[in-house]
Image (cartoon, rainbow, N blue to C red):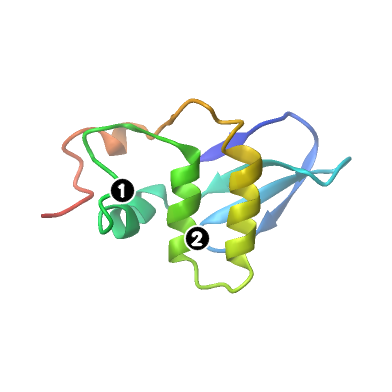
Amino acid sequence: MSFFSSDERCYSIRVDDFLTVYHSIATKAIVGCKIKGVKHLIASEGCDFGIISIAHTKIQLGVLFLLGAMKTSHPFAEKAYRDAAKKLSTAASEPLDLGPAMQPGAELCPA
């Protein structure tokens, strides 16, 4: 899942297996991100803590940053998740659509 708050030219920095952050070439500010393995993040972390309900197909971007930060094993990655969340979560005021894999009945949170 990708999200950009700007269409500026940018470069990417891979944080960990889940998060890539995009920075503006001109200002170095965070302008976007790509979160891989969204379904895995939700199934492995969101279900365990009761954060995610599979009855919904939309999610706030900040929840994905939280789940990724909980899952990462890289020591510097938590700060990258916090920085991305501070910059991008407010830009994504509407919940993001998770798509067909997250439709009600999808096997994410086994009983």
Residue at label 2? 69
Three-letter code, disc 2:
Ala
Three-letter code, disc 1:
Ile
Asked whether residue 25 is in view, the answer is: yes
Residue 91 lies in what quarter of the image? top right
Residue at label 1? 51
Q: Residue at coordinates 70% horizontally, 56% vertically from top-left? A: 13
Using residue 78 as the reference point, say whether residue 61 is left or right of it: left
Using residue 5 as the reference point, say whether residue 37 is left or right of it: left
- Label 1: state its secondary structure: loop
Q: Nearer the viewer, residue 93 or 96?
A: 93
Q: Nearer the viewer, residue 80 or 35?
A: 80
Disc 1 and disc 2 in contact, CB within 8 angstroms: no
Using residue 94 as the reference point, say whether residue 85 is left or right of it: right
Using residue 51 as the reference point, say whether residue 63 is left or right of it: right
**Residue at the top extreme of this rendering:** 94
Vertical side of 56 occupied by 109: above or below? below
Asked whether residue 15 is in view, the answer is: no
Q: Residues within 10 Å of mark 2 (few under 14, many from 20)?
A: many
